Amino acid sequence: MSDLLKGNFTTKKQVTKPNETKDSDTLESTFKKAALNSIGGSMVYVERTDLTWDGED
Amino acid sequence: MAKILFINPVVREEDVPRHIPYGIALLAAIAMKEGHLVQIYDANAHRLPLETIIEVCQADEWDAICIGGLTTTYNYIKKSCKLIKESAPNAQLIAGGGFLTSMPHEIFEWIPEIDVGCIGESFVTFPEVLKKIDNKDFNYSDVLGVIHRDLTGKSFLTNIRPNIKDLDTLPWPAWHLFPLDIYFANSSNLFSEESFTSKRRMDINGSFGCGLTCKYCWHLGTTGDMLVEENDNGENDVVFTYGRNIRYHSADYIVSMVKHLYEEYNIDFAAFIDENLMTMDVASKGTWLKELCKKWIEAGLQPTCRQQGIPHDENCKGVHWNGTSHAGLHRPETLKLMYEAGCTHLVYGLESFDPTVLRNLGKGSNARKNKQSIATCLASGIKPIPNIIIGFPEESFESVRNTIEALVELGITAKPHFATAYPGSEWYYAYKDSIMEQYDQDLEAYIMDLGDASKITATISHEFSPMQLLGLQQIVYLKDLRLLDLSEQHWAPVQEKLAPVIQPKMSFNLKTVKEAGPLAS
Ligand code: B12
């Protein structure tokens, strides 16, 4: 069975996933991703315990 | 019957794949129901080299190859279309989705390989196009809701396709044609403890449309927000409006779908991708969410932690869920029911806490409601996820100060997104000239540059330059009012002498009136 295509019939040719390690699996690229993640992106955090405001102003 | 291949383009490359494309999954289900032979290549899930597309296109003799997604998939789609046409020249190349609907003529110019495109809602248009292809009739000029070409390559838009009336007539998405293991492996996210521990999350869509008119937002031309009208050259073009055809699935449809996902795929989390659950609830006069929660519990989907009032842990059974809320439209009693039924977090697009910014935004909220929303939501037990934006057209040192002060007061740490004019939005049309100027008159370069709004592309702030906005983003993140004061002392006197860097204008493609596109009877 082709594992890259999914459908309701069998295709003439199978398309399988190449086995070679993906670029994203090398230590270098994993490190790069982790490093970049720590620098960029958007984030948000609400400290539940920090909320002293009671909703009336 | 036609033999068709769907390709789901790569989106948000810097992150792992997290969302089965709901639109493609629905269209695949519809196509199969009509008797067509369907295969899906989910490039976003597999993340293989682009050239894999060649092999996929040569796996069979396709009658049609279909590709589409939101605007930020443009780069991938453009490169793919070249390879698709080269490797499967006999297949009709069909496009659809946000990247196309927002700017159909431009896309047809930039991607000459596309044969036909579905504009806006495609539930009826797409099967009609397939029927034509099945009959080897490639003249699409009599199909509503498409863009097509003549022999010279020139593009034409046909008249608008009415939205379907009853969403419950839609089949369930064809989830089984996607590599679910890949998606399940990325189920966890950082929004709530329950979503963090999720191992089998799936998206569901309960409604289409949102009555609000936020200037940064766009409704994909699928929710009555679009008309097709003749422009000055006498050619049909898309026009986006404040009109809406608000439609939601019945609670029964949603609950039976989730029950199926629970039983068939053992999901532990359902993420509502609806534009806004609360605006939909208002449209139902406050009945929709209440009924949904009641039926969720009756169907046995309520998580055991909520049923028993105990902390959530890995032994919890049932289906947790999340969605999008609105600071001015949520009601404590509804939130309470949602919590009981398993809702874990709600995204609130608060955007800003500045009165002027909020007044001009079209969101129907104000600083007081924004502040209050956090406490109201927390009181229900649901975790609020506030979204903050900087770089609004009217952003000033004062507006940034108002936002920081509120963040301090509410205990929120947020790295704001940058105000970005995505195609289709009111901002896009108002600032198109300025955007073009910022990209040397190359609109395609702008589209290719768009990604997450966590980086600056084109600015629309009348006063602040990219350098200042980058600094202000960091200052908001740090909530550092001292740095803000210092910056203002330094810049404000200069800024007074400068002309605004950006100015808005009117556009043919935007009508700020409540004129809705047609709805099928
Ligand atoms: C899930 C989602 C995502 C997912 C991706 C989903 C995916 N795999 O495609 C993620 C989380 C990655 C995402 C990210 C972003 N998103 Co988003 N996202 C959505 C959301 C919530 C649901 C999309 C959906 O499935 N809708 C339901 C289905 C049924 O609709 P649909 O996909 O459009 O499909 C219909 C038609 O468009 C058409 N169609 C679609 N595809 C195809 C393909 C073919 C071949 C055909 C014929 C037809 C067709 O037929 C379908 C039936 O009518 C929408 C809002 C919404 N509720 O729609 C926003 C939305 C699509 N996102 C939007 C935006 C702005 C973003 C971000 C830029 C946000 C940000 N500030 O960072 C980022 C982009 C990040 C990046 N780097 O690319 C905008 C689109 C803007 C635009 N011009 O395209 C939307 C509309 C939100 C909004 N109202 O502003 N998003």
Image: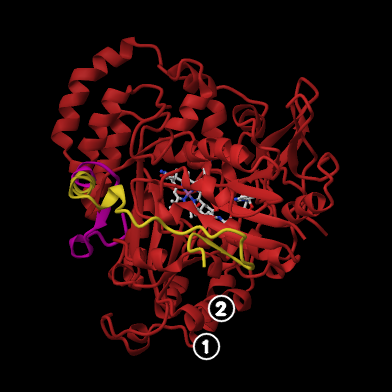
- Between circles 1 and 2, the one closer to the viewer is 2
- Is residue B279 rendered to the left or right of residue B61? left
Q: Colour of chain A?
A: yellow
What type is the residue that disc 1 sits on?
Glu
Quarter occupied by the N terminus of chain B: bottom right
Q: Chain of mark 2?
A: B
Label 1: which residue?
Answer: B298
Q: Which residues are magenta?
A: A35-57
- For disc 2, the neighbor class at 10 Å (few under 14, some 14 to 19, many from 20) is many
- Is residue B238 rendered to the left or right of residue B234? left
Q: Residue at x 69, y 49 (%)?
A: B64
- Is residue B320 rendered to the left or right of residue B205? left
Specify the farthest residue to the top: B497
Q: Which mark is residue B398?
A: none
Q: Chain of mark 1?
A: B
Q: Nearer the viewer, residue B292 or B490?
A: B292
Label 2: which residue?
Answer: B255
- For disc 1, the neighbor class at 10 Å (few under 14, some 14 to 19, many from 20) is few
Q: Residue at x 22, y 55 (%)?
A: B411
How many discs mark residues in the rendered view? Answer: 2
The earlier-in-sequence mark between 1 and 2 is: 2
The secondary element bearing badge 2 is classed as: helix
Against B372, residue B360 (above or below) is: above
Let me know if residue B258 is in the magenta part: no
